[in-house]
Amino acid sequence: MANLIAGRGVVKELIQNDFRPDTVAREALALLEDPVRRQAVRTGLGEVRDRLGPPGASARAAAIVARFF
């Protein structure tokens, strides 16, 4: 959902067949070992938080996602 809210790829999405121990471990290690990548994700998630704004974010997030359907 973070990528939809950001309007760009902020985090690697591992869904369905891509959500496996090896892919999760690879992405986790990439974040742990690469401070530039880790900071980019943190910055992107900060932007998502800012877009969501004050309390009630889940309702606003649902409205954003609903625009895609």
Image (cartoon, rainbow, N blue to C red):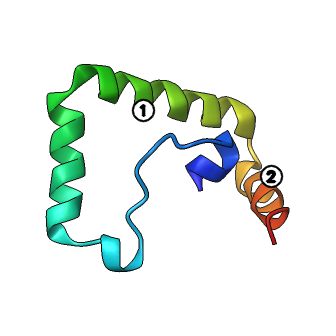
Neighbour tally class for label 1: few under 14, some 14-19, many 20 plus, Cα within 10 Å = some
Residue 46, quarter of the rendered image: top right
Mark 2–mark 1 Cα distance, whole angstroms, equals 22 Å
Looking at the image, residue 5 lies above or below residue 22 = above
Asked which secondary structure carries label 2, the reply is helix
The amino acid marked with disc number 2 is Arg
Task: State the residue position of label 2.
Answer: 60
Vertically, is 42 above or below 19? above
Residue at image point 71% right, 56% down: 58
- What residue sits right under mark 1 in the picture? 41
- Residue visible at 66% across and 52% down in the picture: 4
Mark nearest the camera among 2 and 1 is 1
Screen quadrant of the C terminus: bottom right
Q: Position of residue 23 (x, y in %)?
A: 21, 62
Locate residue 29, reporting x and y percent: 15, 43
Find out whether the residues at labels 2 and 1 contact each other: C-beta distance under 8 Å. no
User: The N terminus is located in which quarter?
Assistant: bottom right
Name the amino acid, label 1.
Answer: Val
Q: Outermost residue toward the bottom?
A: 17
Other-residue count near label 2 (Cα within 10 Å), few / some / many at <14 / 14–19 / ≥20? some
